[in-house]
């Protein structure tokens, strides 16, 4: 097998995976068939593919992931089946689909019922936790068998990211932002939930960050029209000439978490969201819109690996760039009815939510580094509770210690994306003014960056476009100014 043959087969393989991911995640298919797809393309994980890809770091890391994917595909199908069919029984006799509990918790104003919902959710997690443990164990054995060191070192080498250095930087970021975060959290907990830091659970965080007080300013019916209008003013087409398809319908099996499903890059990209109201819908939608625009603007002349593979910190940075438009007073003044004190209160709340999310992921990465260096995965539950609770000041539960993970240290991609996005946002403001999001000269500039696909990793893009290395300094300063 040659590298060119790998690329051609990779196109077809990813199209099948992307379509299956869309159908199952959007609730259009009751069962997932990832195992069948991996079996049809088994040679992409075989020795010939391994040797053909070895000279190219992107292709090599991809073949390794194919091996992992094939090894765990049956478990992934079982997890999808469990998520689609599981139900949660409440103390009052109500039974609801597991997929709906996250939405219900975030929308529940009454704290006793909110906590009851979360207890009921955690009570059914034994089966998916066992499946996840088996899946992670298989992945760990396979990755450590590559001869690249322990699991963390091997994953770092494959990703081209110094995970330990990033973990250390996360520790410094957590320390630097601790006081402003604690002060802002104490203010919001007291005013909105009548609680103090340390008294609130993760379920309370879901409701607090839901921002129900501003729901009226972000009607669901205006979601897509507002996006089309704003992106059009920026000089871009929100549907990329029909390459982006929107799926905003309510379905019983639809995942609660919004996602973007590229099926054929750049020609067929799905943006999927299960709306449950308010600004959180808008932020999730704009985040996935950034992904969709990135995938749909990737040059069709790029090789397979620069359209499909590479450092996902880059696509996450575009997603975050669009999501964080909703933090800008100028954006809100033009595309929402918020004005005066209410607008300022919303901006401050969203700035706090931004810092909370970054702190959570900084803690997640540090937890995952420790988890995968522990002798047994089962040893991670107590560390998970301690690490996430200390960073967020919301009480976390041990039942989530293996389910609150993104494969392959994906938390690192988010963290690097936030670093890059802070610099990109400053650059666009400097070049196109504070309302760059409606400047028709800005869209073509952003589209030019997106056309690169993921040819350059986040560090290279930062060095070339911003003239600086990736770090947390700009992001930390932005958060501190917003909360001062």
Image (cartoon, rainbow, N blue to C red):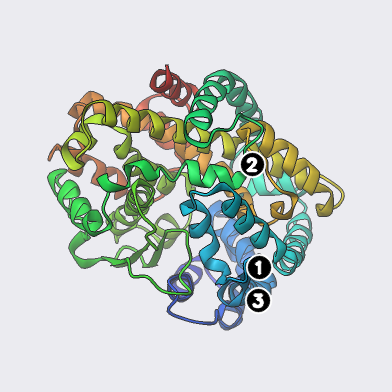
**Badge 3: residue crowd in 10 Å (few <14, some 14–19, many ≥20):** some
The residues tagged by marks 2 and 3 sit, at their Cα atoms, a distance apart of 25 Å
Q: Earlier in the sequence, mark 3 or mark 1?
A: 1
Please tell me which residue lies in front, 436 or 117.
117
Q: Is residue 387 above or below residue 279?
A: above
CB under 8 Å between discs 3 and 1 = no
**Badge 1: residue crowd in 10 Å (few <14, some 14–19, many ≥20):** many
Q: Write the residue at 30% across / 27% down.
A: 344
The residues tagged by marks 3 and 1 sit, at their Cα atoms, a distance apart of 18 Å
Question: Residue 144 occupies which quadrant of the picture?
Answer: bottom right
Element at label 3: helix
Q: Earlier in the sequence, mark 1 or mark 2?
A: 1
Q: Write the residue at 66% across / 32% down.
A: 198
Residue 259: percent from left, percent from top: 43, 60
Element at label 2: helix
Which is more foreground, mark 3 or mark 1? 3
Element at label 1: helix
Residue found at the far right of this picture: 375
Residue bearing the label numbered 2? 364
Residue bearing the label numbered 3? 78
Residue 475: percent from left, percent from top: 45, 26
Res. 67 mark: 1
Q: Write the residue at 79% across / 60% down.
A: 141
């Amino acid at each position: 097998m040659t590298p060119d043959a790998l690329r051609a087969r990779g196109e077809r393989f990813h199209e099948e995976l992307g379509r299956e991911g869309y159908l199952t995640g959007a609730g259009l298919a009751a069962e997932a068939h990832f195992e069948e797809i991996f079996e049809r393309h088994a040679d992409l994980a075989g020795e010939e593919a391994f040797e053909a890809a070895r000279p190219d770091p992107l292709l090599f890391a991809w073949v390794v992931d194919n091996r992992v994917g094939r090894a765990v595909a049956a478990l992934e199908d079982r997890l999808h089946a469990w998520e689609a069919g599981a139900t949660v029984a409440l103390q009052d006799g109500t039974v609801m689909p597991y997929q709906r509990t996250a939405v219900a918790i975030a929308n529940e104003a009454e704290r006793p019922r909110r906590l009851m919902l979360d207890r009921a959710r955690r009570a059914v997690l034994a089966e998916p936790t066992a499946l996840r443990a088996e899946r992670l164990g298989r992945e760990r054995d396979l990755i450590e068998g590559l001869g690249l060191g322990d699991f963390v070192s091997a994953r770092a080498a494959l990703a081209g990211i110094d995970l330990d250095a990033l973990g250390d930087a996360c520790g410094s970021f957590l320390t630097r932002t601790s006081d402003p975060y604690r002060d802002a959290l104490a203010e919001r907990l007291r005013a909105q939930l009548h609680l103090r830091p340390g008294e609130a659970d993760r379920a309370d965080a879901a409701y607090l960050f839901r921002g129900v007080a501003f729901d009226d300013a972000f009607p669901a019916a205006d979601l897509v029209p507002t996006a089309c209008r704003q992106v059009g003013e920026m000089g871009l087409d929100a549907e990329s000439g029909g390459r982006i398809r929107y799926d905003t319908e309510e379905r019983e099996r639809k995942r609660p978490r919004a996602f973007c499903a590229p099926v054929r890059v750049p020609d067929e990209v799905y943006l999927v969201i299960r709306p449950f109201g308010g600004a959180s819908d808008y932020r999730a939608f704009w985040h996935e819109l950034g992904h969709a625009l990135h995938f749909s603007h990737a040059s069709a002349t790029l090789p397979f690996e620069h359209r499909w593979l590479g450092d996902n910190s880059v696509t996450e940075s575009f997603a975050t760039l669009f999501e964080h438009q909703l933090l800008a007073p100028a954006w809100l003044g033009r595309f929402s009815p918020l004005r005066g004190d209410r607008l300022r209160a919303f901006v401050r709340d969203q700035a706090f939510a931004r810092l909370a999310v970054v702190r959570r992921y900084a803690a997640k990465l540090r937890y995952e580094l420790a988890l995968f260096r522990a002798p047994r995965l089962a040893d991670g539950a107590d560390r998970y509770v301690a690490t996430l609770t200390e960073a967020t000041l919301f009480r976390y539960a041990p039942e989530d210690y293996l389910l609150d993970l993104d494969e392959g240290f994906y938390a690192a991609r988010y963290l690097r994306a936030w670093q890059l996005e802070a610099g990109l946002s400053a650059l666009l403001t400097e070049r196109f003014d504070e309302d760059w999001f409606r400047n028709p000269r800005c869209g073509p500039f952003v589209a030019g960056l997106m056309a690169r696909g993921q040819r350059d990793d986040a560090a290279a893009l930062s060095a070339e476009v911003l003239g600086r290395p990736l770090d947390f300094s700009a992001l930390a300063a932005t958060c501190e100014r917003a909360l001062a």
